[in-house]
Structure formats: structure tokens, C-alpha cells
Amino acid sequence: MRVIFSLVLLFMSLQVSQLTKVYGSQKVLDAVSFSAEPGRILGFLGPNGAGKSTTMKIITGYLAADSGEVKVLGENALENPKKVSSRIGYLPEHNPIYLDLYVREFLEFSGGIYGMKSAAIRQRVDELIRKTGLQPEQHKKIGQLSKGYRQRVGLARALIHDPQVVILDEPTTGLDPNQLVEIRALIQEIAADKTLIFSTHILQEVEAICQDVVIINRGKILAASPLSELRGKATAVELTLETEEALELSWFESLGEVKFGPKGTKELILSVPEANEVRKALMQIIASRNLNLISLNQGKKNLETLFREITQAP
């Protein structure tokens, strides 16, 4: 029984259930639920102000929730934040580094915060300096480093105690293209044997390195699935129909996913896996109802279109 329980924890090392946070009259998080597993990068995606950072802060114990549950490796993180903190590595959106400290000095200081022994700290700092590519900069003050190297220091600090769950909040913001590629590669390497959550408002970042995705907006989870499933939805064909007369959604529901377009009831958008037969069916409906056709256009839905649809939905 103990072995089975351990395997369950390994498979789903982070579980967030019905997490709710209210500031005054504003519900910042509304029953947020999702899970993450080892060896896969979870992209926590949403527009600015969607509730991403609030969620990350609650998981890591920096902020209290009004209700809900967070379990890290089976441990209740909301009831035992100090016990869980040693299992989590956290890089906040605003990298909390001391600019007047030297790189190695800062990392050794960070290891001491977690109660690590001196010999273990030195060994771990050496390992992380190699892993994060900080060798050329390790004897400089952090304030002398570029943004990309400062992010590497922040990542090393988040990993100093070898946590099983790593949470990175907007870690690639402000990086140039070369720095971006290097940090992405580093994050993928880190995630090989850890549960890693990558919070961002940039869809391209999720596409580049994530296997799973959770989309949040206005404090609500709007989608949660493997990225491959989301890509599958984004390969649909979109047919846009415009007529002179008002239309009824019920006339077209048997053909695929249908909704009114930006022009109101005189424009329909149909999402279908294949367009040829649907176009023929559309023309039959138009003829049978004596509608005057203005236009029938065909396009392909992509991930960006799908993301906009999900996050702009009322």
C-alpha cells in the first residue's frame, strides 16, 4: 500500500484544488484547479492580470488563500507551508537578488538559508554554476551582470536546495533572442527530473518548451490539457459565412462548432475538421431558406487564434 501511495505522489506531485482568493470585492482566483507531474513542463498561461502570480505565490506560501487546497508531494502546502517550502524552488517575476553580492557569495548565502552544511553548499554551488553557465561571471558582483545572467543566478538560487517542484514566474521577460534560447534550454534541462511550472503571458514561450498547458483569465481556469491536444483543436478549419438576413445558430449546429461573428447575427463562424462537405451543406441551407449570400470565406485556426478566443470569451 505504501508503494502504491508513493507512486501516486510521484505521478502527480502538485495538485491545486478549488483555490480561491478575494481582495475586497474582487475575486482574483475563482476555484482554480489543476495538477502537474514530474518530467513535464506545465505552461501556466494567461494575459497580464489573469491571476498567474497570485496562484504561484499561494502555492509557494508567500500568500494565503481564502479557500481551496494545494498539495505538494502529498503534503498540504496551505496547512504546512514551512514543511513544503524546502521541496519547492521559486523564481518570482521580479528576481529577488542582491546586486551588491558576488555570484558565488549570494548562492552560498542562499544555501545557508535552507540549513545546508558548508561542504554541501560549496559542492552544490559548484554544480549549479556549471549547470547554469555562470563560470565566466561567478566572481563578479550580480549588479555587473546582464539581464540574462541575472536570470541564471535567480534560477541557480531557486535550485540551490535541490527541490522536487520548481516554479518560474515570467522567467524570460526582457531577454534578448540569444538569452531567450539559452534560458529555454536550461529550463528544459532542469525539468528532466523535476515538476516544473512555467508561468507566462507569451504563447510562443509555452509552444517552445511546454508539454502541458493551463490557461487562466480573470481568475478562472479556461483550459487545461496537454499542449498536443490544444494544437489539435487549433488545426480546425474556420468557415465564415455572411448573409443579408439574420441567421439562427440552430440551423447550422449539426455541421460543427458554430457561433456568431463580429458582425452579429448576420455572420457565422464554423469550426470544422474538414471543409469540403460542410461548404456543400452550407449552400444547401442557404438555398432552402432563401438567404442572400454576401460571402463565404475559409481560413485555418492556429494556436494564437484559439488563445484569443479562449481568453476573450465573456
Image (tube, rainbow, N blue to C red):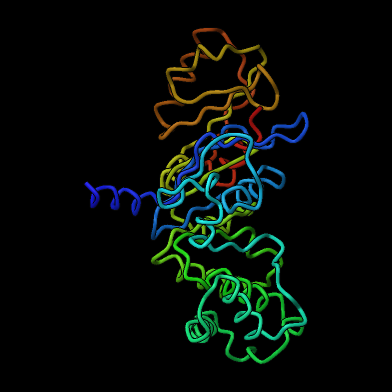
Q: Nearer the viewer, residue 268 or 61?
A: 61
Residue 114: image location, x then y, percent: 56, 70
Q: Nearer the viewer, residue 246 or 121?
A: 121
Residue 24: image location, x then y, percent: 78, 32
The residue at the point 66 percent across, 34 percent down is: 312
The residue at the point 39 percent across, 60 percent down is: 39
Q: Is residue 215 left or right of residue 39?
A: right
The residue at the point 48 percent across, 20 percent down is: 282
Visible residue check, residue 191: yes
Q: Nearer the viewer, residue 71 or 180?
A: 71
Q: Quadrant of residue 96?
A: bottom right
Above or below for 284 versus 40: above
Q: Quadrant of residue 314?
A: top right
Above or below for 257 versus 236: above
The residue at the point 66 percent across, 16 percent down is: 265
- Count how many numbered circles sit on residues in the image: 0
Visible residue check, residue 178: no
Q: Nearer the viewer, residue 302 or 164?
A: 164
Residue 159: image location, x then y, percent: 53, 71
In the displayed orientation, state which residue is furthest to the top. 289
Residue 144: image location, x then y, percent: 76, 85
Above or below for 125 versus 307: below
